[in-house]
Image (cartoon, grey):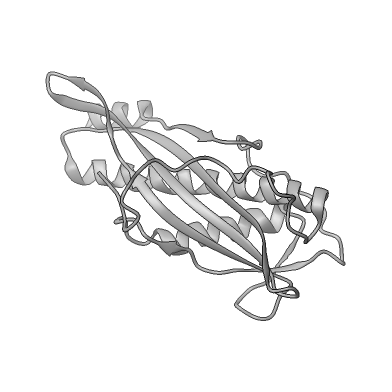
């Protein structure tokens, strides 16, 4: 029992988000203008083999876009100026460290693509691919390890949402609800993985 308590107290997560834009510390809370464009955020499409991420990632994104994207996020799927669509395209869980053939630490990495459509003109005005990683310790308890992995996936999703909100706020400040000029970056490059869902 004492070992378990000591292990839990010493257990921690480390997070890393790759790509442009500030991501650590959460999206800044900004005052939303009364004439700010309205946005509907649909549930994510989940093309990974990890279950139940689509609603969680959509919820994190709604929260972050509400506080830091410069838009007025609407509840439900009613008419809005902008529609956000997200897709979880890969979840990768490689092994990091070994001691005596026992894994002590692992990392989950998620890749997400997102697009925003301007419904008034019927065109996609913004698209990004972002990734986030979260490390977690593992033990001989498989169920406990699964819980830690699930928590790491949730933390990675929160960082993805923060990153996307920051990036779109930057787009809105520079280009409004119009598409960005050709040549503007759209985020990180996804490694060659099975688009039907890669997790290992």
**Quarter where residue 73 is shown:** bottom right
Residue at 33 percent of width and 46 percent of height: 193
Most extreme residue toward the top is: 99
Task: Point out the image quarter for the N terminus.
Answer: top left
Which percent across, then down, holds residue 44?
48, 63
Which percent across, then down, holds residue 125?
69, 60
Residue at 12 percent of width and 18 percent of height: 100
Residue at 64 percent of width and 62 percent of height: 116
Residue at 67 percent of width and 46 percent of height: 167
Q: How many marks?
A: 0
Most extreme residue toward the left is: 100
Task: Point out the image quarter for the C terminus.
Answer: top left
Quick check: 48 above or below 117?
above
> 123 and 84: which one is in front?
123
Most extreme residue toward the bottom is: 78
Which percent across, then down, holds residue 178?
77, 60
Which percent across, then down, holds residue 115?
59, 60
**Quarter where residue 106 is shown:** top left
> 169 and 189: which one is in front?
189
Report whether 57 appears left or right of 98.
right
């Amino acid at each position: 029992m004492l070992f378990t308590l000591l292990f839990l107290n010493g257990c921690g997560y480390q997070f890393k988000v790759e790509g442009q834009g500030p991501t650590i510390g959460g999206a800044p809370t900004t005052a939303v203008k009364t004439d700010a464009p309205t946005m509907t955020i649909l549930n994510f499409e989940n093309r990974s083999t990890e279950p139940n991420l689509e609603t969680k990632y959509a919820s994190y994104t709604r929260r972050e876009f509400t506080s830091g994207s410069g838009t007025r996020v609407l509840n439900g799927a009613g008419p809005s100026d902008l529609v956000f669509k997200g897709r979880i395209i890969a979840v990768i869980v490689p092994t990091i460290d070994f001691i005596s053939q026992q894994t002590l630490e692992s990392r989950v990495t998620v890749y997400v693509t997102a697009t925003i459509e301007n419904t008034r003109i019927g065109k996609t005005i913004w698209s990004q691919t972002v990734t986030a990683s979260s490390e977690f310790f593992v033990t001989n308890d498989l169920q406990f390890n699964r819980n830690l992995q699930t928590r790491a996936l949730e933390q990675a999703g929160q960082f993805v949402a923060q990153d996307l909100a920051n990036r779109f706020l930057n787009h809105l400040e520079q280009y409004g609800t119009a598409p960005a000029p050709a040549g503007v970056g759209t985020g990180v490059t996804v490694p060659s993985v099975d688009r039907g869902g890669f997790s290992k």
